[in-house]
Amino acid sequence: MDDRDGVKRKTFLRQAGSVAFFTALGLPFYSCGSTSADDSSEQTVNSSAVGITVDGNRITIDLNSITGQLLSEESDWLLIRDKRTLVVNVDGSLIRSFTSRCTHANCSVNWRFLNRQFECTCHGSRFDTAGAVTRGPATRDLPEFTVSREDDRITIETRNA
């Protein structure tokens, strides 16, 4: 083994460690090939991500946190995977939230947001920012969760959907 192989191994371990660290924090990763957050296929976090607090059916997001900043502008969105919750900043200030269980086949983790529409990539159903079906095969709208905002905190009241 020469020194060059050792350097490659160290570089690999350093990069793999970074990926593991950010994954453990529940932070999203973007590849160099992505052109913008608006055309990303995922904005996925877990409820353990920095800035998210869960108490039963209540999810609180601190908009000043790293995770909360992902909702700071119009059309920003999140999928909180383990709570099966979609969150979207509709117009720069109005934030709405829906179940991430598609009403077609209950897929809950395969979402993207393009052209102001959620798309369930399991079968192609699309929903607007009000949760209404815009393209099937789904025939029912996404159930909406109650969202309240106080200063820089949003609270989402989920229910079994």
Image: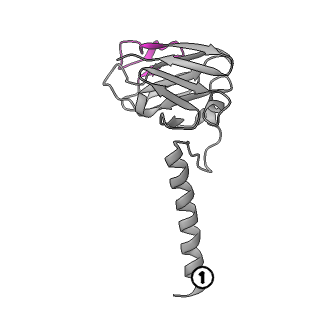
Element type at marker 1? helix
Q: Position of residue 141 (x, y in %)?
A: 41, 12
The residue range painted magenta reads 125-145
Q: Nearer the viewer, residue 82 or 107?
A: 82
Q: Position of residue 112 (x, y in %)?
A: 50, 31
In this rendering, position of residue 107 left or right of residue 150: left
Tell me what residue is drawn at x 55 percent, y 42 percent: 28
Q: Position of residue 86 (x, y in %)?
A: 49, 24
* Image vertical order of residue 71 relative to residue 138, above or below: below
Image quarter for residue 102? top left
Tell me what residue is drawn at x 57 percent, y 13 percent: 148
Q: Nearer the viewer, residue 52 or 142?
A: 52
Label 1, on which residue?
A: 4
What's the residue type where badge 1 is placed?
Arg
Q: Position of residue 77 (x, y in %)?
A: 57, 27
Quadrant that contains the C terminus:
top left
Is residue 130 one of those drawn in magenta?
A: yes
Please tell me how crowded label 1 is: few (under 14), some (14-19), or many (20+) other residues with Cα within 10 Å.
few
Tell me what residue is drawn at x 33 percent, y 21 percent: 104
In this rendering, position of residue 48 left or right of residue 68: left
The answer to whether residue 94 of the structure is visible from this angle is yes
